[in-house]
């Protein structure tokens, strides 16, 4: 463990692939800075929302809240960040007005290239990333922590409110997955130190901004958990599959919930990814055969259906099932293959650039005589055992999503 005894090359290469698709330190600094600009910008004297921000709270949701953010891979838009902005709906404001006013209030946000008013959020587009800010009307007290309603206002169709609890989901997720052992974390740390991450699309404005370099780099404590790793590899695989399609892809929160429910597989990372693919494929097969469509609920708010916008047709489920079967087939083929063929398979699954970089870092790790792992001709990649902890009970040590409350003129951390 974590390197599969039955096919050790595969797990080592999956790990190296993972390191290539994660955000660089600089990505994370830029993300942090932009995230922290949200309250600052909305509270500026000329902000049309200024008077409503006294009790506002902003916090990460989605992949950033669960340690599963990756570089997209098929787009110059490297990654996206999702944030919730909680503030009570001003008296008399319609659903669409909340989104319109938030859209207007973001005008002039530092470095933004375009601001899009979406159906449920306002999207701030930058040179190589975007930030989705979803306004939320907090439920009346007493409420389940951070439950509220988000606004849905499409071009065609009725405006609606949906009760959601993204904070509760992130807390559930973080408490559900099995954390990586210290030994496994050390192995990944050693591998990371050997990989020089490239920042391919750096904004020139931020390049000149010394403050970015000074920000501490934060990492999510569960980013190296095997269930989270399988989720990140799955997302990368799907990014490439859907890159040239018109169809909508399955939404990330649905994939995330299933990834956390798939038990830790002690046979290693490849097995973990195969289990996730099989669990999702089984759901598609069941839905197609029975006509009962997926309706995965938020464990922290059972009225919230993660499948309310996907799938929209049987064809979407068939396409997704076929993708998953392709992934499993290719991984099983890789298990029986020589190194050169594994490399070809990975190019198809995760992209050429990332695979070539992963192969280089894998080979350099394999030839490191002082490392815990080494490549043995004919035997593959041999690693220290017991690198993944057994499943734990309870969520005592689970990191909680940390909200930022903001008040005029200051940002409370
Ligand atoms: Mg997003």
Image (spheres, rainbow, N blue to C red):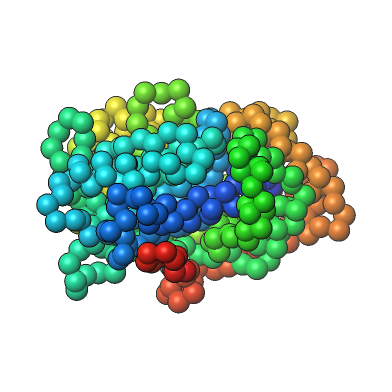
Residue 90 point in image, percent of width and height: 19, 56
Q: Residue at x 58, y 67 (%)?
A: 389
311 vs 176, left or right, is left
Q: Residue at x 15, y 46 (%)?
A: 94
Residue 396 point in image, percent of width and height: 45, 77
Residue 307 visible to the viewer? no
Residue 20: image quadrant is: top right
Query: Across the whole image, how many numbered discs are drawn on residues?
Result: 0
Q: Residue at x 31, y 64 (%)?
A: 54
Residue 309 point in image, percent of width and height: 26, 39
Which residue occupies the foreground of this view, 352 or 110?
Answer: 110
Q: Residue furthest front?
A: 45
Residue 108 visible to the viewer? yes
Q: Residue furthest bottom?
A: 396
76 vs 311, left or right, is right
Residue 270 point in image, percent of width and height: 58, 47
Q: Is residue 345 placed above or below 141 in the rendered structure?
A: above
Q: Residue furthest right?
A: 369
Residue 282: image quadrant is: top left
Q: Residue at x 26, y 30 (%)?
A: 314
Q: Check the picture and name the quadrant holding the N terminus.
A: bottom right
291 vs 66, left or right, is left
């Amino acid at each position: 463990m974590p390197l599969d005894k039955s096919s050790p090359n595969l797990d080592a290469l999956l790990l190296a692939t993972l390191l290539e698709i994660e955000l660089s330190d600089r990505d994370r600094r830029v993300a942090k800075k932009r995230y922290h600009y949200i309250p600052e910008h909305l509270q500026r004297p000329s902000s049309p929302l200024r008077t409503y921000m006294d009790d506002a709270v902003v916090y990460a949701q989605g992949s950033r809240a669960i340690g599963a953010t990756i570089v997209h891979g098929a787009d110059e838009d490297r990654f996206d960040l999702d944030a919730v902005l909680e503030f009570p709906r001003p008296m008399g404001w319609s659903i669409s007005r909340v989104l319109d006013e938030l859209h207007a209030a973001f005008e002039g946000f530092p470095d933004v290239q375009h601001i899009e008013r979406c159906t449920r959020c306002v999207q701030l587009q930058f040179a190589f990333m975007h930030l989705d800010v979803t306004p939320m009307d907090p439920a009346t007290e007493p409420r389940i922590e951070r439950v509220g309603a988000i606004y849905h206002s499409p071009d065609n169709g009725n405006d609606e409110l949906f009760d959601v609890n993204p904070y509760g989901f992130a807390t559930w997720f973080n408490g559900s997955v099995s954390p990586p052992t210290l030994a496994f974390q050390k192995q990944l740390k050693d591998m990371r130190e050997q990989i020089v991450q490239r920042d391919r699309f750096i904004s020139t404005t931020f390049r000149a901004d010394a403050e970015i370099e000074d920000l501490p780099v934060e990492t999510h404590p569960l980013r190296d958990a095997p269930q989270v790793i399988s989720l990140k590899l799955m997302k990368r695989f799907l990014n490439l599959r859907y890159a040239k399609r018109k169809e909508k892809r399955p939404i990330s929160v649905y994939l995330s919930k299933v990834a956390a429910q798939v038990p830790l597989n002690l046979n290693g990372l490849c097995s973990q990814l195969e289990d996730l693919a099989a669990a999702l494929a089984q759901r598609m097969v069941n839905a197609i055969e029975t006509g009962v469509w997926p309706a995965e609920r938020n464990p922290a708010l059972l009225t919230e259906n993660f499948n309310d916008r996907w799938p929209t047709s049987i064809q979407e489920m068939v396409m997704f099932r076929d993708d998953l079967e392709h992934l499993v087939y290719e991984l099983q083929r890789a298990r029986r293959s020589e190194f050169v063929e594994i490399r070809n398979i990975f190019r198809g699954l995760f992209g050429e650039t990332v695979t070539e970089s992963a192969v280089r870092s894998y080979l350099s790790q394999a030839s490191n005589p002082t490392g815990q792992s080494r490549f043995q001709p004919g035997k593959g990649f041999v690693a220290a055992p017991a690198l993944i902890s057994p499943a734990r009970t309870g969520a005592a040590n689970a990191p909680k999503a940390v909200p930022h409350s903001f008040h005029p003129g200051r940002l409370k951390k």
